Image (tube, rainbow, N blue to C red):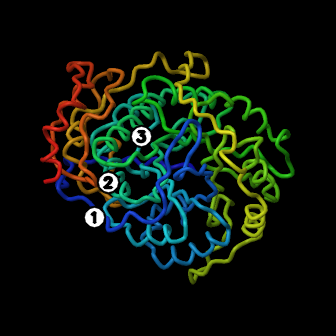
Amino acid sequence: MKACVVFSVLGAAVAPAFASVVARQSKGNLPPVTVRGNAFFAGDERFYVRGVAYQPGGAADAADPLLDLEGLARDVENFKSLGINTIRIYTIDNSQNHDEGMKMLDDAGIYLALDANTPDYSLNRENEDTLHRSYNDVYLQSVFATIDAFAGYNNLLLFFSGNEVINARNNTNAAPYIKAVTRDMKQYISNRHDRVIPVGYSAADVAENIEAQALYFNCGTDDERSDFFAFNDYSWCDPSSFTQSGWDAKVRTYSDYSKPIFLSEFGCITNQRNWGEIEALYSTNMTGVYSGGLVYEYTVEPNGYGLVEVNDNGDIEPNEDFERLAEAYKATANPSGAGGFKENGEASECPAESDEWHVQGTNLPAIPANAVKFMDEGAGEGPGLEGDGSHFAGEPSESTATPGSGNPTRSPAPGSTGGAGNNEGAAAGLDVPLHFVGMIAASALFGAVLMF
């Protein structure tokens, strides 16, 4: 799903009060999903993503589907008919409470894979200058507010730090900024929340650089590495097979990858979708490397994808793709046991600069100085879908990060989503002009403050 680039100017500083945090009433009944080696686990059971992308109205209608409770209740019944366990949502309103919608999903046994960006609050890949300017404190405040709004739900599966920001051979210069956002999100979660939530990137399957992307987001210090790597793959077009599609070659390419890999979008529409890839994706030919995937997409939009038609009166009519997908999921069980996963969690070697990979060295931009305070004070209320946007607002990064500067700098109180503390830690990650100072020992000193 290509997120539209919207240019906007934020004329004033971020105004939300840090003490105002969206309340959550219940964590839910599903077990949180964690990462072990190159796989996801729900408790002691291997977890495979079986899901669909869910954004009724598409990118042009940036609405939050979790707030349309009537529509969600209708669609949850179809989710259950499909036999899925995950939906992906690209845009939500981080100024609103999502207890009811998340409970509906939890009751149906469904997890949420959530994009942390919205069209107005995202990186702008137009050129090097827009990339630099769009990685700013106003943008990160929105991203962190989204984390606060959803971190309390057990059925939050993961966060995407970006989607197809690199979508061509010539814009890999965005990679350090994507990786910096991933680092910042991981640090914010560690500092502000008492649960580990996987954070990673959803990549476009660009033939010239997709392998380099996978290596890059898994190289470097642990604080910089993604917790998983996902990509949008439309290479299996029926009639096809494991070998004809090239999926066998991709499994070999990523056979030594040390983090979970899954398809964040799949489902070619060149011909009739018979969903032969479902059997392959959940077979032992792939599960030693892959952890499932998300079908694109639930509602039929102008791009021609979709499993259901939405009538003018709001009624849903499943199409033949829906019926065939439900049959394919029903006929395909997960492998027994752990599916051949690997415990090894070692970092990849960073890819070298080349004609297809325009990233020199391993340096990342430091977190913008004005965003450091969020690590201790919290992000406050999100701007929602009516905010003025972040692309040309706020203060960008002005320095290079020290490796390891994204490590946790404080310990959150159990269940904490707010509070205050010392903000030297994230600031110490600025190589110029500040120096990294470990703050782990200081966490106890401020523990009492965190509960305030």
Label 2 neighbourhood size at 10 Å, few (<14), some (14-19), many (20+)?
A: many
In the image, residue 270 above or below residue 428: below
**What secondary structure is marked by label 2?**
helix
Could you say which disc has been placed on residue 23 in the image? 1
Q: Which residue is mark 3?
A: 123
Would residue 47 be found to the left or right of residue 390 on screen? right
Task: Give 231 or 111, whichever is nearer the viewer.
Answer: 111
Task: Give 47 or 295, whichever is nearer the viewer.
Answer: 47
**What secondary structure is marked by label 1?**
loop
- In percent of the image, x 49 and y 26: which residue is there? 173
Would residue 13 be found to the left or right of residue 31 on screen? left
Discs 1/3, front = 1
Point out the tag, 1 or 3, that comes first from the N-terminus.
1
Which image quadrant: the C terminus?
A: bottom left
The residue type indicated by label 3 comes to Leu
Circles 1 and 2: CB atoms closer than 8 Å: no
Would residue 121 be found to the left or right of residue 57 on screen? left
- In percent of the image, x 83 and y 52: which residue is there? 238
- In percent of the image, x 73 and y 41: which residue is there? 286
- Whole-angstrom CA distance, mark 1 to mark 3, is 28 Å
Task: Give 305 or 240, whichever is nearer the viewer.
Answer: 240
- Whole-angstrom CA distance, mark 2 to mark 3, is 20 Å
Label 3 neighbourhood size at 10 Å, few (<14), some (14-19), many (20+)?
A: many
- In percent of the image, x 81 and y 41: which residue is there? 245
Point out the tag, 2 or 3, that comes first from the N-terminus.
3
The residue type indicated by label 2 comes to Asp
Q: Which residue is mark 2?
A: 148
